[in-house]
Image: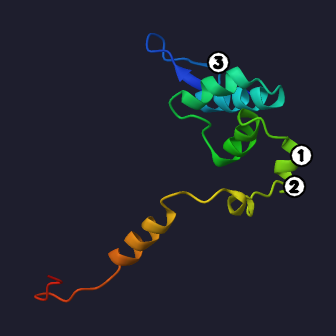
């Protein structure tokens, strides 16, 4: 919905009323429309534009569409991936990484070396 603002004409000092629309309101409408129509190309263009999706509310609407997720699953939280990492195969360097991490947390007081 466009608001009206009064502007003073410098030459005659009279105010006129002209419709104006805030750019962010236009962007919000653009985002909402792209989400409603599931226009992935438009959402991609908005995502890389300065300001992106403007708010978390719009991001929450847009990103599931961009990711190709079912909006119903996302809205009711039925998408659960919490246990899926456990099904991954073990990495060949996993044991070495654990040793390196454990070693990095060993505390050596100042002035004492391990040599």
Closer mark to the observer between disc 3 and disc 1? 1
Q: Earlier in the sequence, mark 3 or mark 1?
A: 3
Instruction: Please state if 6 lies on the left or on the right of 78 as rendered.
Output: left
Please provide percent x and percent y for residue 46. 61, 27
> Who is closer to the viewer here, 55 or 112?
112
Query: In the rendered image of this protein, does residue 7 appear above or below residue 66?
Result: above
* Residue shown at 78% from the left, 27% from the top: 33
> Who is closer to the viewer here, 97 or 14?
97
Residue behind mark 2:
76
Mark 2 Cα-neighbour bin, 10 Å: few <14, some 14–19, many ≥20: few
Q: Earlier in the sequence, mark 2 or mark 3?
A: 3
* Residue shown at 83% from the left, 57% from the top: 77
Query: In the rendered image of this protein, does residue 106 appear above or below residue 69?
Result: below
- Kindly state the secondary structure of the residue where label 1 is placed: helix
**Tag shown at residue 18:** 3
- Kindly state the secondary structure of the residue where label 2 is placed: loop
Residue farthest along the front direction in this orientation: 92
> Who is closer to the viewer here, 45 or 2?
45
**Quadrant including the C terminus:** bottom left
- Kindly state the secondary structure of the residue where label 3 is placed: strand
| Residue 91, quarter of picture | bottom right
Q: Is residue 89 visible?
A: yes
**Tag shown at residue 72:** 1
| Residue 6, quarter of picture | top right
């Amino acid at each position: 919905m466009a608001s009206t603002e009064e502007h003073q004409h410098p030459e005659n000092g009279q105010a006129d009323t002209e419709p104006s629309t805030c750019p962010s309101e236009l962007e919000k409408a653009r985002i909402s429309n792209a989400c409603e129509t599931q226009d992935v190309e438009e959402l991609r263009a908005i995502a890389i534009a300065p300001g992106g999706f403007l708010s978390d509310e719009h991001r929450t609407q847009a990103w599931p569409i961009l990711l190709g997720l079912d909006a119903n699953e996302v809205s009711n939280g039925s998408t659960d991936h919490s246990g899926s990492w456990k099904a991954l195969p073990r990495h060949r360097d996993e044991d070495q990484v654990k040793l390196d991490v454990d070693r990095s947390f060993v505390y050596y007081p100042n002035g004492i070396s391990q040599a």
